[in-house]
Image (spheres, helix red, strand yellow):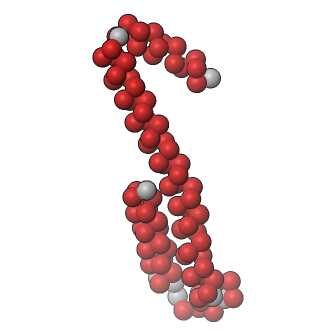
Amino acid sequence: VLIGERLIRRLRRLSFEAALRQPMGFFDDTTNSVGRLCTRLATDATLVKGMTGDALGSATEGLACLTTALVISFNASPKLAGVLMAVFPFLII
């Protein structure tokens, strides 16, 4: 969650800085009105958070569980853990 929040903060800051660097004529266009740009800052960052926050958290959790399971299995029975490591790629398919 913390990584996702940092990513969103950075994304919003970079987007806002990019908008500030635009020439004055950029804001005269109706597609680049201030209201639309503010809405875009809010919605785009929220969409990115929804995609990365949950997915990144699930992937990290899965990797941590797999690593822990392998460490425990190799400590308990190295031969059985070796067999499971050989069979595991076939289980993914």
Give the x, y percent position of residue 89: 54, 20
Q: Nearer the viewer, residue 91 or 21?
A: 91
Quarter of the rendering occupied by the N terminus: bottom left
Q: Nearer the viewer, residue 21 or 58?
A: 58
Q: Is residue 22 left or right of residue 63?
A: right
Give the residue furthest to the left: 75
Going 47% across and 48% down the picture, which residue do you hit?
Answer: 57
In terms of image quadrants, where is residue 35?
bottom right
Q: Is residue 67 left or right of residue 45?
A: left
Q: Is residue 54 visible?
A: yes
In terms of image quadrants, where is residue 72?
top left
Give the x, y percent position of residue 70: 38, 23
Going 47% across and 78% down the picture, which residue do you hit?
Answer: 16
Quarter of the rendering occupied by the C terminus: top right
Q: Nearer the viewer, residue 32 or 9?
A: 9
In terms of image quadrants, where is residue 63?
top left
Going 40% across and 36% down the picture, which residue do you hit?
Answer: 64
Above/below status of 74 relative to 43: above
Above/below status of 35 relative to 59: below
Above/below status of 12 relative to 68: below
Give the x, y percent position of residue 19: 51, 81
